[in-house]
Amino acid sequence: MEDKVKNAERFKGFANIYDGARPSVPNYPIEKIISYLKKKPACVVDIGCGTGLSTQAWKNNADLVIGIEPSPDMISVARKKPLANVKFIQAFSDQTTLESHMADVVICSQSFHWMEPKATLKEINRILKSGGIFATIDYDWPPISSWEAEKAYSDLINKERLIENSTDGISDSFSRYDKSKHLENIQRSGYFRYSREILFSNKEKCNADRFINLMLSHGGLQTILKKAPNLIEDELEEFRKTIKGIFANEEFEIDFCYRMRIGIK
């Protein structure tokens, strides 16, 4: 099975959890992209759009917004949010099916690390207009909250990664590309005359259930729960108890810390 097909399969069966827990794209990166572009984009393409959270964020900032997503589960949720200027296409990042030179902006929000970079950047270059902008927008795990909750989250992620990397039937079920090399990959592609990294954060409201569901929105954890739940069920239950014990019924603020890598064609 091709890597891109395996990666799409990774996001099967938890689209509603993902949609209810994950953040949308905040205003700041949209403002900066439009500032670099120097005009309202006629067309924005969101590759790896998932349930459309990042696509919908552009609805008032572009004439047309197109979400590209290979996962049937994810795109089915996205299509339940109809807007006149937003549409979704089920396709892969290296074969978007779009016309050449049609996009002012192409974004990958928390998704570029699931795409083979060379083939994807070649396709992005094909669909981007001259002077257009490509941006990867990623947030760091865990979000900022309390140190005890962050530690519990990090401990469970570390367990998830250990199982992913050491368990037959799981370690070969995905291909993840290093986020820290996003900017280098943009620069090495030769398609962009200027590139840089921009750091920012954004506050959102949260409660214990959302914090737990952020963890449950990880494709790695979901894969383990499907294929070898006994390897992580006890740790997941302990995580739930810890988070409920820390936050109870409180509503609180969390900060998502973002890294945006940007290229100007």
Image (cartoon, grey):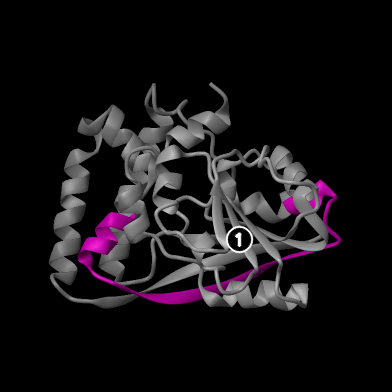
Q: Quadrant of the C terminus?
A: bottom right
Residue closest to the eye, 5 or 153: 5
Please say whether residue 139 is visible from this viewpoint.
Answer: no
Q: Quadrant of residue 137?
A: bottom right
- Name the residue: 48% across, 36% down: 8
Task: Say what secondary structure mark 1 lies in.
Answer: strand
Q: Is residue 54 left or right of residue 129?
A: left
Say which residue appears at 18% left-offset and 70% top-offset: 247
Q: Examine the structure image and report whether residue 187 is included in the region drawn in magenta.
A: yes
Q: Is residue 260 inside the magenta stretch?
A: no
From the viewer's perspective, tell me whether residue 101 is left or right of residue 160.
Answer: right
Residue type, numbered disc 1: Val
The answer to which image quadrant residue 240 occupies is bottom left
- Residue 13 location, x and y as percent? 32, 39
Q: Magenta region: which residues?
A: 186-214
Q: Viewer-proximal residue, 117 or 89?
A: 89
Looking at this view, is 133 or 241 the one in front? 133
Location of mark 1 (residue): 65
- Judge whether 13 appears above or below 111 on screen: above
Above or below for 50 versus 172: below
Of 247 and 62, the residue lying toward us: 62
Residue 148 position, x and y percent, is: 26, 66
| Residue 18 located left or right of residue 86 | left
The residue located at (54%, 76%) in the rendering is 27
Q: Is residue 265 visible?
A: yes
